[in-house]
Amino acid sequence: MNQIILGFSVEPNSEVKESLNQGDDSVTWIGGDIIYHIIDQFEEWKEKTKEDMDAAARENLVYPGKLLYLENHTFRNKGPAIVGMRVLGGRVHLGQRLMKLDGTPVGQVKSLRSRASEDLKEAKQGEEIAVAVMGPTVGRHIEELDEFYVDIPESHVPRLAKVELTELEKEILEDIVRLHRKDDHFWGRRHVG
């Protein structure tokens, strides 16, 4: 929790000084003898705190994404299936679920690796990566050149409407919503949370 204490022409008390000396980042002290400077510093703190909170909220948001299973890029068939993919649009993040273009669930992303064998938390449009997907068996559930969507939780749809998306991400989101609305007309329209 972000806490701030403002002081005009006063010094912080011993409890506040102790918190500040211990490096407690949750408490911020702004003080001085000129009220306008205190207000300016407070406005800066408030803006930075809001940006940090928005960034944290975006980190937990499932963004639209579309992937292509590359030909001749099967590294393991199952348990988890590890295949080479290109992110055609949007992004994919660890832990997200994938589905086929017809809405059939595929599985969950367990790991992402770059061509340099670095573990990634996220891959964005244009990147080619190795993806470990728990659930499918290559040749039975998924095939080379299949395309997949990142399956977005229904509660994230209204939140995505407030985030700046690229035109391609908007198109992918519309496709995913359209797929889900085949089974549930109100999917993504309900106010959740």
Image: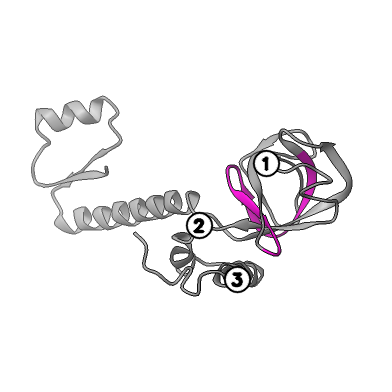
SS assignment for the magenta stretch, majority: strand
**Residue 133, image x, y percentages:** 69, 41
**Residue 31 figure quarter:** top left
Colour setting:
one colour
Do callouts 1 and 2 mark residues in contact (Cβ within 8 Å)? no
Q: Which mark is residue 175?
A: none
Q: Which residues are magenta?
A: 82-102
Q: CA distance from mark 2 to mark 3?
A: 16 Å
The mark that comes first in sequence, 1 or 3, is 1
Examine the rendered structure and indicate whether residue 9 appears above or below residue 157. Answer: above
Three-letter residue code for mark 3: Lys
Three-letter residue code for mark 1: Gly
Q: CA distance from mark 1 to mark 3?
A: 28 Å
For residue 181, side relative to residue 192 (left or right): right
Disc 3 secondary structure class = helix
Asked if residue 148 is among those painted magenta in the image, a careful observer would answer no
Examine the rendered structure and indicate whether residue 143 appears above or below residue 19. Answer: below
The residue located at (30%, 35%) in the rendering is 25
The residue located at (59%, 56%) in the rendering is 151
Dot 1: few (<14), some (14–19), or many (≥20) neighbours within 10 Å? some
The residue located at (8%, 42%) in the rendering is 10
Residue pointed to by mark 3: 170
**Residue 78, image x, y percentages:** 76, 36
Q: Nearer the viewer, mark 2 or mark 3?
A: 2
Residue pointed to by mark 2: 153
Q: Which mark is residue 135?
A: 1
Three-letter residue code for mark 2: Pro
Q: Nearer the viewer, mark 1 or mark 2?
A: 1
The residue located at (27%, 44%) in the rendering is 2
Disc 1 secondary structure class = loop
Quadrant of the rendering where the C terminus is positioned: bottom left
